[in-house]
Image (spheres, coloured by chain):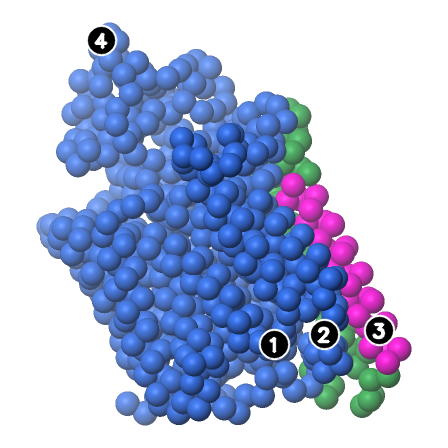
Amino acid sequence: MGMQWEGKSFIDNLPKIYGVYTGGFLAFFFLMAFFERMGMSADVIGILFVAFTIGIYAFIGILSRTMAVEAYYVAGRSVPPVFNGMATAADWMSGASFVAMAGGIFMAGHGYMAFIVGWTGGYILVSTLMAPYLRKFGCYTVPDFIGTRYGGKFTRFCAVLVLVVASFTYVTAQITATGTIAARALQIPFEAGVWFGLAGILVCSMLGGMRAVTWTQVAQYIVLIIAYLMPIVWMSGVQGFGWFPQLMYGPAVERIMELEPLLGVGVAALEPQRGLSVLATLHATPREGAMAAWQFVTLVACMMIGTASLPHILMRYFTTPSVRDARNSVAWSLFFIFLLYFSAPALATFSKLQLLDPTLPTAIIGQPVEQVLALEWVQRWSAIGLLAVIDQNGDGILQINEFFLNPDIIVLATPEFAGLPYVISGLVAAGGMAAAMSTADGLLLAMANALSHDLYYKIIDPKAETKKRLLTARILLLVIGAGGALVASLKLTGILGAVAWAFCFAMSGLFFPLVLGVWWKRANRQGAVAGMLGGLFVGWWYLLAVRNPQEWYGIAAPWFGLNDLRFGIVGIVASLVAMIVVTLLTPAPDEEIQRMVDEVRIPRGATIISSKS
Amino acid sequence: MSELTAENRVEHWRQTKRLMIIHLSVWFVFAYVVHWFAVPLNNINFFGWPLGYYMSAQGSLIVFVVQLFLFNRQQHAIDTKFGVAEDQA
């Protein structure tokens, strides 16, 4: 097919192309709703949703195949800011954001909101400190910047090392998420779901690299945002909360706060159930005391600084046509991310009120246990062990501490609480799949590109031909993907834990070498190496120490309450100190490097690394 | 403006740094300070929301989004003033 993926006419047509695509997706949704009315089974609808959307991504991925270096690594630097914003938003919002966030807020209340603040505010750092300067640099990968700014093969190698550690930790969590959703929607075992999910991911990125990933991510963003917002708006409209629930749910929060003392929220279960929890945290009331506040802000800090250090996000801004577009594109990314994140607490509030408020027909707390057990959705989720209703005090009435659930089901199950048709659940499954696949794609590409461009081409074989380089990139993509799927099928860590660790690894090793590379002319090679390795290994050691208190790693208790989700704070301090001390003890970088930094600081003029290669 | 003088280069960077510091100060307040005081802020009712909760659910986020679009305009104005924006090559 002679489709052109660059050039003015393609770019001008983008709104039309994606407009038609969005219309087509909505038409598919209504068609499914119609089929459901006609009696099509829930299983078939689920399969069709997942298969149809993956088919479209694969189609885009195959159409945008390329053998050009510039297209493969940076999508030809031709992605307009708004579309790059959507692609970044899909790249950014993972299975964890989509599936687990609202449930986390539902269960853990205000403490969990640190993720919402942290996962949005990080973009201020990206825009003010990094993205425009990295774009001016003209690099293909993040280690490309480090290697050229500081010089030296070993420096470049250190950056590749940090990138791989952080991204690999992250990608296993995403492959786990695609496996879980594929397994449920297609009714296959989890292990098979993992490999199936990986195949879908690779089809999008193998042939077309960054160019293919960009255009599938835009398509995935459209699916995931529709899938997240439609159930919220629909439920809210149907139940009389208004058609713009994000602006209207204040009174619902107030109502929950009134009900909490009456229902006894905060009392632990008489007999805890394995893997499930009862609602025991107040919805909107923060815990008192300086320690709670400290824990909140340190988690916010880790998520924000991690955002600004994650290579799969930073490399998205290498694809814009100009420095100014890179900046605008960060703002659009945040806007598109904001649409989902400011809806998640609304969903959690709304979902909770439906279960708690005795004046609503959907309430279950305070109702006779027999009546609750007769509800269809209670039976369905109990059957697969993700929910349990047990009358532990034997009074025949369901108390708040007798309703057990796995928080991850909130997003999937809320439409069912509200009695919406199954087609909504199919839509949500497709959205979760899109979220997890798009993030996994970005991560795999970041790793394969760093290994093929920086390790293979720049360090091992600088004379390699274009064809050989791109072939290496593709083989690496396969190998890393298979490695990720293998680790994912072992189920070593939970999704959220792995995500937080990835952020902490990235910030420990990369944040200061990147920022100071632009903002401190004096920063030199020795300092950068010390910063990367010092940060990475001190962070790693601290993680091991707090995870294994019985082993002897040199500390008896976590410092300042910094647990394993927050080890990046320790790592980044080590990185900063190491980088400054070593830089000051060694000679300043030469004239040429200093001139390079001067040029990076102004948007005008040619990129530092020339695009011919 | 074709050649950038050394003084202009220094001045452009000084103003860029100043803008960065201003924006990061605003960011610091909405990322950390308001959430540190979430407990007392929650006593204030904001259209039904307790204010401390509201800031973490929407308030800070809205500030961040608006801030980024504003930052882009301001930075572009600085670049244009010194003739270093891209279309001024």
The residue at which mark 1 appears reads as: A151
Front position in the image: A482 or A386: A482
Q: How many marks?
A: 4
The residue at which mark 4 appears reads as: A394
User: Spatial distance from mark 4 to mark 3, Cα to Cα?
Assistant: 76 Å
User: Spatial distance from mark 1 to mark 2, Cα to Cα?
Assistant: 10 Å
User: Image check: B5 left or right of A416?
Assistant: right
Of tags 3 and 1, the one toward the viewer is 1
- Please give the label number shown on residue B10: 3
- Please give the label number shown on residue A589: 2
* Chain assignment, label 2: A
> Could you tell me residue A135's position as x and y percent?
59, 75
Q: How many C-alpha atoms fall within 10 Å of the one at disc 3: few (<14), some, or many (≥20)?
A: few
User: Spatial distance from mark 3 to mark 2, Cα to Cα?
Assistant: 19 Å
User: Spatial distance from mark 4 to mark 2, Cα to Cα?
Assistant: 75 Å
Dot 1 or dot 2, earlier in sequence: 1
Q: Is label 3 on the same chain as label 1?
A: no
Report if residue A498 lies within the magenta region: no
| Image position of A58 with respect to A222: above or below | below
